[in-house]
Amino acid sequence: MKTHQDQMSSEEQKQSTKNDFTKISVGIVGGTGYTGVELVRLLVRHPAVGIKVLTSRTEAGTRVDAMFPSLRGLTDIQFSANAADELAECDVVFFATPHGVAMNQARELLAQDVKIIDLAADFRLQDTAEFEKWYGMPHVCPDLLLESVYGLPEVNREAIKSAKIIGNPGCYPTTVQLGLLPLLQQSSPLIDPNSIIIDAKSGVSGAGRKAEIGILFSEASDNLKAYAVKGHRHHPEIVQGLNGMHGGQLVAAAFDKLTFVPHLVPMIRGMLSTIYVRLTDAGCAADLQMLFEQQYQNEPFVDVMPFGSLPETRSVRGSNHLRIALHRPNNGDLLVILVVQDNLVKGAAGQAVQNMNLMFGFPETMGLEVVPLMP
Amino acid sequence: MKTHQDQMSSEEQKQSTKNDFTKISVGIVGGTGYTGVELVRLLVRHPAVGIKVLTSRTEAGTRVDAMFPSLRGLTDIQFSANAADELAECDVVFFATPHGVAMNQARELLAQDVKIIDLAADFRLQDTAEFEKWYGMPHVCPDLLLESVYGLPEVNREAIKSAKIIGNPGCYPTTVQLGLLPLLQQSSPLIDPNSIIIDAKSGVSGAGRKAEIGILFSEASDNLKAYAVKGHRHHPEIVQGLNGMHGGQLVAAAFDKLTFVPHLVPMIRGMLSTIYVRLTDAGCAADLQMLFEQQYQNEPFVDVMPFGSLPETRSVRGSNHLRIALHRPNNGDLLVILVVQDNLVKGAAGQAVQNMNLMFGFPETMGLEVVPLMP
Amino acid sequence: MKTHQDQMSSEEQKQSTKNDFTKISVGIVGGTGYTGVELVRLLVRHPAVGIKVLTSRTEAGTRVDAMFPSLRGLTDIQFSANAADELAECDVVFFATPHGVAMNQARELLAQDVKIIDLAADFRLQDTAEFEKWYGMPHVCPDLLLESVYGLPEVNREAIKSAKIIGNPGCYPTTVQLGLLPLLQQSSPLIDPNSIIIDAKSGVSGAGRKAEIGILFSEASDNLKAYAVKGHRHHPEIVQGLNGMHGGQLVAAAFDKLTFVPHLVPMIRGMLSTIYVRLTDAGCAADLQMLFEQQYQNEPFVDVMPFGSLPETRSVRGSNHLRIALHRPNNGDLLVILVVQDNLVKGAAGQAVQNMNLMFGFPETMGLEVVPLMP
Amino acid sequence: MKTHQDQMSSEEQKQSTKNDFTKISVGIVGGTGYTGVELVRLLVRHPAVGIKVLTSRTEAGTRVDAMFPSLRGLTDIQFSANAADELAECDVVFFATPHGVAMNQARELLAQDVKIIDLAADFRLQDTAEFEKWYGMPHVCPDLLLESVYGLPEVNREAIKSAKIIGNPGCYPTTVQLGLLPLLQQSSPLIDPNSIIIDAKSGVSGAGRKAEIGILFSEASDNLKAYAVKGHRHHPEIVQGLNGMHGGQLVAAAFDKLTFVPHLVPMIRGMLSTIYVRLTDAGCAADLQMLFEQQYQNEPFVDVMPFGSLPETRSVRGSNHLRIALHRPNNGDLLVILVVQDNLVKGAAGQAVQNMNLMFGFPETMGLEVVPLMP
């Protein structure tokens, strides 16, 4: 097989010339998990990016395409172990690692002018006490946390552009925040902030590429269950995000009252959050569909479907799109908001690339023009 | 292969002698759908039953085990087309047919002293206007409807024993009614009747064995969606059931306010209803776990799991059990009730056999002692 | 929930009286794997068996129904750690353990008159050099190995009845041996012994309940691959079995020539072996369908389907049946033999119970009258 | 959502300028099946193509993105019913229709200088008697059939470039022909032509988007079966292809002797053909791995993996790649060739686009640079 590198090289050179982009150097820490290999899938075709280094403690020396043959012909990069020097030479480093890794390497990288996008939780929660409570470790760099930006472009686009550290949102929080954003930014309250119930469903890849019994094929296939009903780490992240949108009105109320019940669904990729909220009188009177359409009319990745639509997770399989549909059963005061995304793309690696594009002045959709795979 | 009939015959004779049961003759109208073949699976081993006739307009003359090789060696019965005479000789006839079939044959069968268990909706809704609205056809025998009994043993056991016609409950309504029953029978209201939200999830077999694009493997696999958010036929059945439990207090309120959002999950069998209700002060103060355990302590098929459990659909795969678990996130006023069942068993054919057992004085669990298939 | 023990007890007492069987005491070593819990599924309803002890080093003290809620209401047994004494009091002990465990405990149990059924490989291969080569450990009790019987009832029924140690066959070898048995017992060779190609496909549960990346849902779902093409441990077992049937004629030839390529299929249970053999002139002239039907006419668990049938794995889901169908494309000299079974039942735990029934003089099908779960 | 058309337009204009390609107009007849919508997925991003017309008798007037929401934001094209005029204005028309449609419209389109790529079988078999036998209809334009080219680029690249009609290969035949090609082009025979056995496995999407019971989720999921063992329409196509490679030596022999057994696997996309051939002495002596690597060294879409590799279908999910691995168990005379592809891409729509690229002088990989979706 002629590799695409060989074949494409002259064309790609023209392309990068044409685009007037100098390619940036990218590092990925933790390349063997699903978010890591998903970053490679997206970046290996990104016209303004070169993957300089990909780390793995356990797989150092292995070619990434030996581990993931889907990448054969696309890259000949190997996993590196101790790669501090190479990471320091990158323009940006993605952390596709367990919680707690990025915050320990952040200061050194920043000192070398390397930007950071953390796909774990180290830079998501501004309240370090909350972080410590939910993640079981102290935060080692609260000062950097203060500087960091929560990487939800539809909310924080301008701040992201100039950020040095991005806390890339969790998968569930992305669906919930984008599903509720248009409702929370109005001057008069459209919903009862105490009424929010989120019945969320995720494909199994959301649990990561870890050798655990509960996510074996023979355990998770042909099966359905709720999990983490007692408390999920995405709960405080959702509350923080909603509070931020609402001018602080939800702060005290939401934390106790917001209900979040995730479920594990036998599919590889895909996330559907079914969000239930009670409308106020103002909410009942408002044209909610128009509100959502206006909110997202210029967003490249948020699709407000016609009122009453039934979005399917497969309609975004492999793509960075998130689709939203509104329902009001019997035209009553309960609004049902259906939100779907691919948990590994808009819910993780795709959103991280979207953030990178913003940080480096690339077109926001660059490298993300993947048509969803259907069926 | 030696068939089990041959091999078991002497043992079975002893068995029927021992049990002092005269075998009853059973007919099944509509044996080619999933509820029909599920009835055969359960009845072919039922020690007090002989399947006398199995009808299908399209498959008349075909052996049932030619169509469903899982039954090879267990029965040599063929599908019959026009079987009015044979049905009239049965002790009981199950209708595993589309809505509207049973009510057209009921009067003639009753005249021959044949009992009827309808797995479709003809005898579920007592309000014929509601029936007509949701099923798009007038009810042809309102007088028989009045005599019929809604076949939910945990609610109507005594009435079922002497019933001539059973309206076998829908799958979703079974989970919701049993999930809420203990809360609705108390003298002081434990929950706000206007607050009920049911986020329900079903395996694909619930859609039946019909040649439809939407339930093809390549459409339904690796995918998730909500459906029928605008209105599902099980909605009025749920409301009727809850009203019945609550002494009529819910009548006016519930119909508009109860929210029911079903989802299609890529698994063959299994149903999980996640039910959200707001507790009243009395509800917050009550020992709800004890309430549920007491309600179901003598029920052979309802399992109240320890508080905070996470029931999985596979834990009831192939069996007539339904499992319930309670959660109160942050110990607040929202109660989350998780209910799982096999939609084809407790949600359809198994419950029908349970009703039959009650109607004929057999032990309620007879023929239903199937251990769930795990994994 | 009223447990079945309570409810059934009087009936079961009658049952055991009626059957005139004294219940035997059974031990299971290694109850947390799929073959272990499958043994529990089958034995918990077996009328002549009481499960006395169930061991697990890691789960000692845990109730089995806490780990496997599908068993709630059926048993209150707990996992034990060091259970040498209790095992010694059993009538029979099943080893559902990794290879190498049974042979280390066999002598002590035999000394206490406890029979042994090993579901691993310790007592499958009579050639200890072969065992050592494929399993990477020396055999610790070659003398007991000599006494042991290979537990394939359709071949060794009489020997099994008086055996003290059973080497329960591997899943693939069961399909291959029963698929070829009728062809290898004839006086004149019907097939070219050098021509056998076995293209075998297994559901993922065949890989066991182990925390390994390769069998995660997100790895094994929506995917297909061959594996172990360089050599699979079931290869020598198949060769040994075929040699035994063929009067030794295949010994030298088969080992080099037999081709066995297993594949991993995204389903939980089920195994399909597609076996290709070249017919000799005698084979072409023979009535092969009749040959197969005669061979298995009295077998309770082997179903020879009509010539040209297409057996599906789901037709045996959860049951101890194995189905065979023959094809001769274009009526040529190539015979295609399709064999399906549930890898956890006839391919493991079900066959073990069948062996137990033979060893203790119970009806061979006792406890195995499970109707396959379809769909 | 801002549509990609709007957003990309200026960039795309530059792109098409840069590439110096005039966009061609494309028609797709039969856009509602899986190969049709897969063509849209690939062509909607193809820089040198505009989709001018998409036909469907049943869905005329419907927007394609209303039927397939995965395409929302990518196209606003509607299905057309009678579109003869618009098709006549296209540069090329793809037929993603049932067999027999393309041959009835071919002459008229050719008269208008429209090139044709038929994804059905009308232009695959040069022997019209064979066509009639297997497809049950006479061929209406044998003269055009003679002019047509079998669209397997790795075999017929030069002829494809100047072809007016392409018979796009079947999915199974693509895997088998590319899996055997290097072996059949040698001067001295490397394999026994009578020994070929193809044990092929396909995902369910290969059966098309048709409302049929057998491919329902509840039928095909968690299940495995062989099918069409008595004869599959791809059999004569495979034989024709192999004969062509082999200089006609296989003609008489192969048709009777080649064995082809397809299986239906519970996955959406993916095809694995396990091919077994007996090597001649020359074959045993040859460096087969090198032979395969040399054959395909310049092929952009055929990947010869290292000897002994185990290709997985997911490694090509959504991409036009086909991967091959060789095995020689025990270094004997049996060669096992493992070939994987995505049945809807290299096995159908992707190969059709590859053919189009060749016919119009575009880079062969244009529009096909999709990274496989893993997991």
Image: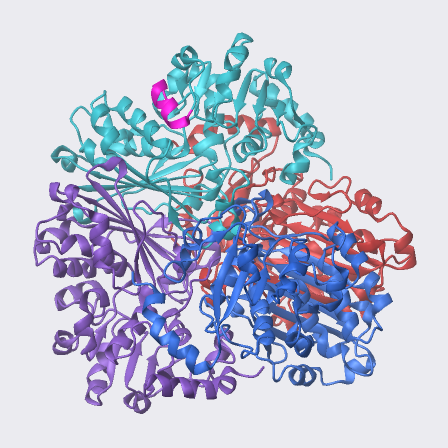
Chain colours: A cyan, B purple, C blue, D red
Q: Is residue D116 left or right of residue B28?
A: right
B169 or B291, which is in the foreground?
B291
D348 or C11, which is in the foreground?
C11
Determine which quarter of the picture holds residue D224. Answer: bottom right
Determine which quarter of the picture holds residue D69. Answer: top left
Magenta run includes residue D347: no
Q: Residue furthest top?
A: A111
Is A295 rendered above or below residue B334?
above
Residue B287 seen by the camera: yes
Is A284 rendered above or below residue C166?
above
Q: Position of residue A195 (x, y in %)?
A: 20, 36
Magenta run includes residue A126: yes
Q: Quadrant of the N terminus of chain A?
A: top right
Q: Is residue A98 left or right of residue C296?
A: left
Q: Position of residue A78 (x, y in %)?
A: 68, 28
Q: Position of residue A46 (x, y in %)?
A: 57, 27
Residue D59 seen by the camera: no
Q: Residue at x 20, y 61 (%)?
A: B237
C233 or D207, which is in the foreground?
C233
Span shown in magenta: A125-136
A32 or D177, which is in the foreground?
A32
Q: Position of residue A106 (x, y in %)?
A: 50, 15
Is A14 rendered above or below residue B283?
above
Q: Residue at x 54, y 20 (%)?
A: A93
Q: Is residue B97 left or right of residue B188?
A: right
Determine which quarter of the picture holds residue D277. Answer: bottom right
The total of numbered circles placed on residues is 0
Q: Residue at x 32, y 86 (%)?
A: B20
Predominant SS along the magenta part: helix
